[in-house]
Image (cartoon, rainbow, N blue to C red):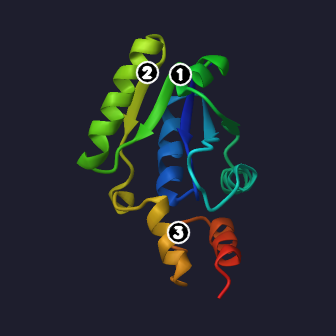
Amino acid sequence: MRIATYPGTFDPVTNGHIDIILRGTEIFDKVIVTVARNTNKTTLFSTEERLELLRKSLSEFPNVEVVSFSGLVVDHARSVGAVAILRGLRALSDFEYEFQMALMNRKLAEEVKTVFLMPNEKYTYLNSSIIRHLSEFGSDVSEFVPGVVQDALKLKFKK
């Protein structure tokens, strides 16, 4: 079985993330969506909340698993038997950072490949920070996130 891991903060998960996950399931037998537990980052949703939102958003996809981790992505990839790390590239601005990370990951774990996927063009401008900002001011984000995420955002930003 060819397994890929798709790590991220997912604060919150967007339709752009889901697009990358679904593209990954077309290439790999299983995609493990991996929520980063990073104590240096302040998130709107707790790790447990992000895991739950992802699980609910991806429940109809049997070859997708949702877990969390802390530490190096390559160590996590090895621990779950992943042959690849999926990364989404929305724009050229993503490329430099992602390229550096891919080279470092290759140095640390040559057997784990980094696979870059581009989302559908309708998601190229979309990221979690924009969704949080729009939600904070009461904007409708239903076009950009699963319904369960929109509901959770409304609860966080009750006005």
- Of residues 43 and 109, which is closer to you in this image? 43
The answer to which of marks 1 and 2 sits earlier in the sequence is 1
Cα distance between the residues tagged 3 and 2: 30 Å
Identified by mark 2, the residue type is Asn
* Mark 3 / mark 1, whichever is N-terminal: 1
Q: Label 1: which residue? A: 74
User: In the image, which disc is placed on residue 99?
Assistant: none
Q: Residues within 10 Å of mark 2 (few under 14, many from 20)?
A: many
Q: Residues within 10 Å of mark 3 (few under 14, many from 20)?
A: some
Q: Is residue 11 above or below residue 151?
A: above
Q: Residue at x 32, y 29 (%)?
A: 100
Q: Residue at x 48, y 76 (%)?
A: 134
Residue 65 picture quarter: top right
* In this picture, residue 25 sits left or right of residue 60: left
Image spot of residue 59 (x, y percent)? 72, 50
Q: What whole-number distance in Å separates the C-alpha atoms at marks 3 and 1?
A: 29 Å
Among the two numbered marks 3 and 2 on one chain, the one whose residue lies closer to the N terminus: 2
Task: Indicate the quadrant where residue 1 lies.
Answer: top right
Tell me the tag on residue 132. Answer: 3
User: Seen in the image, is 12 located left or right of residue 119?
Assistant: right
